[in-house]
Image (cartoon, rainbow, N blue to C red):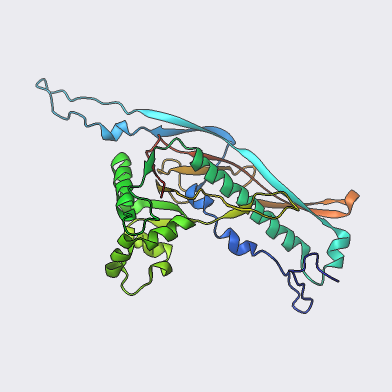
Amino acid sequence: MRPESTSVVLRADLQALAQEFDAETAALRFIGRRTAPIFESAVAEGQYPIMNRENFKKPANTDRAEDGSYNRIVGQFGRGTYDCEEHGLEYPIDDRKRKRYARFFDAEKAATRILRYQMLLAHERRVAALYAAGSFTNHNVATAWTTVADAAPLDDIATGIDTICDACGCAQEQLSIIIPRVDFREMLRTAQVIDKLKYTFPGIQPALLRPAQVASMLQIKQVLIASGAYDTTEEGIAETMAMIWTAGVMYIALLCEEGEGLEEPSAARSIMWAADAPELPVVESYREDKKRADIVRMRDDTDEVLIGETDLFVYKLTNT
């Protein structure tokens, strides 16, 4: 029996599924769950409080009056809303095909791999679109990082870090950088970064630096490399790959950890209606006797939202 694609070889002796695409490894490149950490909600829609920055940024007069009274202040609060929507995909596993290919691979496991990847891809695209549509101020870098001799990415990033720390009172060590793969590579080629590495990581080639090492050099929480891609063409047409996150645009952001409450500051959240879909994604299956097939289904119920005022938790760097 020949496989449908000449580039795929099914090995009966290995009893495994030969794939053209390493879905498990590719899914690790998605950063949506870290750039919009999940918060489990008991209801499908609702509101959450936003503590306005004026509560902290405007100095209050603490002098006691001559009559012995003290000045009083009242906190200012805003509110955000969310409305979870259901997303899902199904994969029918025909009885005849299952039996025909049973000695080569487990059809349910293969279907689950495909569905899981597609669901994570959809979530990644929603989160990337959320950031792209945010009304953040564009801060152009002083010199494009492709100009390796004169670019100053460390200065550009330091300005963004200081701006966020001053705006929301966070520490530098709490911040994350969301950076497209090509921009990350360009940054490592600049003379300023190479010179910095002589003292920070002596003997290491810049191109071999890991994101965790760059985060350590910048004294921040983490560097998230946006490297996910997808085919923009219809089935049957020669593929055209596009990056999910736009090259030349990066974000310095305050991000919480997954599962932390909404009172924890974070640039974005994936609010998940846990009563309907307690995982992202949840896996289900059912039988469809009319078509002699088992149906594997994956779905989630989320709303991806930006939290807080414009530019409070995010500093957008452009033209990198």
Q: Is residue 69 above or below residue 287?
A: above
Of all residues shown, which one is farthest toward the top? Answer: 67
How far from the left and from the top, in percent, is residue 170? 32, 46
- Residue at 40 percent of width and 57 percent of height: 222
Question: In front here: 166 or 292?
Answer: 166
Q: Quadrant of residue 127?
A: top right
Work out whether residue 170 can be spotted: no
Question: In front here: 99 or 315?
Answer: 315
From the viewer's perspective, is 131 left or right of 217? Answer: right
From the viewer's perspective, is 319 left or right of 96? Answer: left
From the viewer's perspective, is 204 left or right of 116? Answer: left
- Residue at 33 percent of width and 58 percent of height: 218
Q: Is residue 236 above or below residue 316?
A: below
Quarter of the N terminus within the rendering: bottom right
Of all residues shown, which one is farthest toward the left? Answer: 66
Q: Is residue 276 above or below residue 188?
A: above
How far from the left and from the top, in percent, is residue 154? 31, 55
How far from the left and from the top, in percent, is residue 178? 44, 51
- Residue at 32 percent of width and 50 percent of height: 156
How far from the left and from the top, in percent, is residue 241? 61, 54
Of all residues shown, which one is farthest toward the right? Answer: 290
Question: In front here: 60 or 128?
Answer: 128
Work out whether residue 108 can be spotted: yes
